[in-house]
Image (spheres, rainbow, N blue to C red):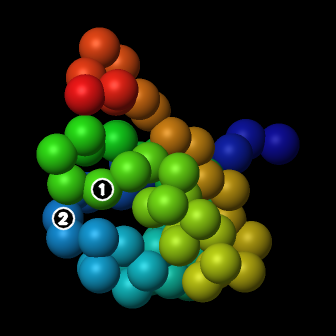
Amino acid sequence: MTAIGARMPRGPHRELVARGREFDALGFDELWLVEDCFEYGGVSAAAAVLASTERVGVGVGLFPVAHRNR
C-alpha cells in the first residue's frame, strides 16, 4: 500500500494544530515538518500535531543542524 504524505507549510506555531487536523481530515498518511531553529522546535511542533490528530504520522526534518545548540 502506498502512503501519501505532505510537507506542512511553515507558519506560526499556533496554526500547526489546525493545519494538522486539515491534513488528517483530507486523508494524508504522513506530515513532514521542517524545524525552524528561529521560530519553534521540531519536537514540540510534532507533539502538538500528533496530539491533535487521529491517524496521521509526523516526521521532522532537522535543518540547519549546526545551529541547534546555539
| 8 or 66: nearer the viewer | 66
Amino acid carrying label 1: it is Tyr
Q: Give whichever of discs 1 and 2 has the lower sequence position.
A: 2
Classed neighbour count for the residue bearing mark 2: other residues with Cα under 10 Å, few (<14), some (14–19), many (≥20): few
- Whether 70 is drawn above or below 25: the answer is above
Residue 65 placement: quadrant: top left
- Whether 6 is drawn above or below 16: the answer is above
Res. 20 in view: yes
Quadrant holding the N terminus:
top right
Identified at 18% across, 64% down, the residue is: 11
Kindly give the residue lying farthest to the right in the view shown.
1
Residue 70 placement: quadrant: top left
Q: Which residue is mark 2?
A: 11
Instruction: Give SS at disc 2.
Output: loop
Kindly give the residue lying farthest to the front in the view shown.
70
Res. 28 in view: no
Image position, residue 24 (x, y; %): 57, 75
Image position, residue 14 (x, y; %): 29, 81
Q: Which residue is mark 1?
A: 40
Classed neighbour count for the residue bearing mark 1: other residues with Cα under 10 Å, few (<14), some (14–19), many (≥20): some
| 17 or 37: nearer the viewer | 37
Amino acid carrying label 2: it is Gly
Q: Which mark is residue 28?
A: none
Identified at 53% across, 51% down, the residue is: 43
Residue 19 placement: quadrant: bottom left
